[in-house]
Image (cartoon, rainbow, N blue to C red):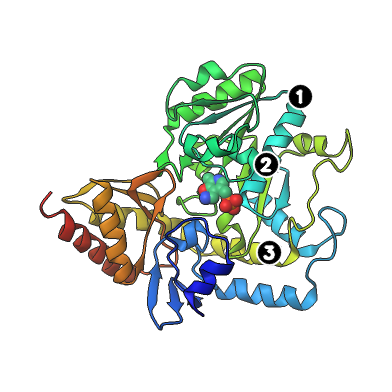
Amino acid sequence: MSSSKFTQYIAQTSDFPLSLEISHAEGPFLYTTKGREYLDFISGIAVSSLGHRHPKVVEALHKQIDAHLHVMVYGEFIQKPQVEFAELLLSNLPSSFDQVYLVNSGTEANEGALKLAKKYTGRKKLVAFKNSYHGDTHGSLSVTGRDVYRDPYLPLLPDVHFAAFNSDDVFDLLDDQTAALIMEPIQGEGGIIPADKAWLQKIREKCSEKGILLIFDEIQSGFGRTGSLFAFQEYEVVPDILCIAKAMGGGMPIGGFVASAEIFQTFKYDPPLNHVTTFGGHPVSCAAAHANLKELLAGNYLQRAKEIELKIKDKLVGDGIVEVRGKGAMLGLELASKELTQQVVEDCFEQGILLGWTLHSNTLVRLAPPLIIEDELLEHTLDIISGTIQKYAGGM
Ligand code: PMP
């Protein structure tokens, strides 16, 4: 396939697509039609946490495809893969979470969560953080804290207020007009910035005091990436609504938002059917999500994420490296300059290692290896990354 057809027919989002033509993918590796192998060290941006085509996921997919594909819009028919996935998910979450509403993507999960919070509280005001990323549809973009992405699409939702992350500014914004505070417990696209634990706990208290729904966007941090099933568990802070997607489907498109049955009641009336979706909770995606979660819980992947963090933080030190931050296998490697970052990412790519940036930072290398990566491959890769940094940073 020529790359000119790709740029001719597929609407582009930048002038610099990587343009790898993938022939197949397996475990931690991507293979191109030119016969090259790449180690996927970003897991398709925090999606393929169990590697590409995990056999359990593939098996569940075949089984579901042989049974049925789409049969009805969301919420009408009993579809076993949806119910099985939901039961397993909810039985592994705190008891305040009773139900999940299934959608197709991360941004749709956030859209649904924002609507639900407005309807449940009867309030309109929303609070979010600078440097956040919640998706590119209008509602999610309205709570995304980066002006360059927002400005071309103004006006967005009214009554959205932004505070600095990890700052006490937010407490002045949380009042009894506020429907929800939406946040990532670890900002992903903002440059892998974990929330401070005590600050997050104070936010929880203030939201409860003011009747504000606390929404955690764990679309990037969820499903084991940080070393817990969800990052909120490490913070010991339970949100009112939890938004999930990305790694949820083991490589298939699916998202969801989780809350109590009491909160979800409000979607049933005034008017009925006020939040519906045709494909949300697609049975094939749900079958994959169920197999993926079963495997994630059965294996020692959460522990593995923590080991990966230790190995990476231990190995990546030296000239040119400002810091490695984040939790588990959701890490960011902050380098000394934009030029160095670009050189390292490009050179590693030439050497068959796929790294990447985060959307809001140009000095941060995203490190999000699959949790199935074995020690030998991990160490070998870290030696290459470290050597590449030293090659360019030597004179700094
Ligand atoms: N929230 C967060 C924290 C994300 O990282 C992303 C995707 N990068 C989204 C929302 C949007 O998800 P999607 O691309 O599936 O709409």
Please tell me which residue lies in front, 30 or 141.
Answer: 141
- Name the residue rendered at 27%, 59% in the picture: 344
Relative to residue 39, is residue 389 drawn left or right? left
Q: Going from the N terminus, do you reach mark 1 or mark 2 first?
A: 2
Q: Secondary structure at mark 3?
A: helix
Number of on-image labels: 3
Tell me the element at label 1: loop
Measured as percent of width and height from the top left, residue 37 is found at 39, 77
* Relative to 315, residue 53 above or below: below
Distance from label 3 to label 2 (Cα)? 20 Å
Residues 98 and 111: in front is: 111
Across and down, in percent, residue 266 comes to: 81, 34
Q: Left of 100 or right of it: where is 168?
A: left
**Which of pointers 3 and 2 lies earlier in the amino acid sequence?**
2
- On the question of residue 93 being in view, the answer is no
Mark 3 or 2: the one toward you:
2
Q: Amino acid at mark 2?
A: Glu
Specify few, some or many for label 2: CA neighbours under 10 Å numbering under 14, 14-19, or 20 or more: many
Residue 111, numbered circle: 2
Q: Which residue is mark 1?
A: 122
| Mark before the other along the chain sequence, 1 or 3 | 1
Q: What type is the residue that disc 1 sits on?
A: Gly
| Disc 3 target residue | 285
What amino acid type is highlighted by mark number 3?
Ser
Q: Secondary structure at mark 2?
A: helix
